[in-house]
Image (cartoon, helix red, strand yellow):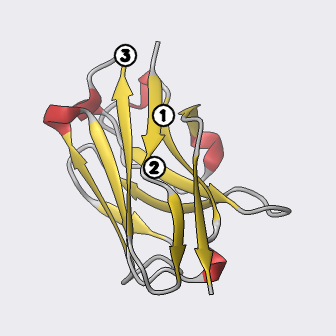
Amino acid sequence: QVQLVESGGGLVQAGDSLRLSCAASGRTFSLYSMGWFRQAPGNEREFVAAISWNGNTYYTDSAKGRFTISRDNAKSTVYLQLNSLKPEDTAVYYCAAPDGQNRLQDPVPVGGWYVYWGQGTQVTVSS
């Protein structure tokens, strides 16, 4: 059973930084791409960033230059560094992992490709 546990959210001011973590368990972490999504109140869940099993990174336009995704396979953890935060970044952030048949596959920036989700961590940015 794959489990994902996010941490690191909080209340910050515009321009501040946060680092989100997602600890994974239940299978060989290094074989799978991982993604980060977010959902603001009243909005649909949206893709933020992804990292492939071999370290290639992908970002939505709003995240490029401000957010950095990384992974530590020894710790089975994926990170999302959030810099220069803006009030519009306020959302619940979720990490996600694909089904076991998608091992060694590049990530897809669509929520439906992922089947395992964490509980989410709240990021609130005040102006």
For label 2, the crowd category at 10 Å Cα-Cα, with few meaning under 14, some 14 to 19 and many 20 or more, is: many
Decide if residue 89 is on the left or right side of residue 39: left
Lower position in the chain sequence, tag 2 or tag 3:
3
Who is closer to the viewer here, 118 or 54?
Answer: 118
- In the image, residue 9 sits, relative to residue 120, either above or below, namely below
Disc 3 versus disc 1: distance between alpha carbons? 13 Å
For label 3, the crowd category at 10 Å Cα-Cα, with few meaning under 14, some 14 to 19 and many 20 or more, is: few
Q: Where is residue 91? Give x, y as percent.
A: 65, 62
Which numbered disc covers residue 98? 1
Which numbered disc covers residue 70? none
Q: Identify residue for label 2.
A: 35
Who is closer to the viewer here, 105 or 33?
Answer: 33
Q: Amino acid at mark 3?
A: Gly
Q: Identify residue for label 3.
A: 26
Kindly identify the residue that appears in the image at 46 percent across and 33 percent down: 5
- In the image, residue 125 sits, relative to residue 99, either above or below, namely below
Who is closer to the viewer here, 17 or 43?
Answer: 17
Kindly identify the residue that appears in the image at 42 percent across and 80 percent down: 16
Decide if residue 95 is on the left or right side of residue 41: left
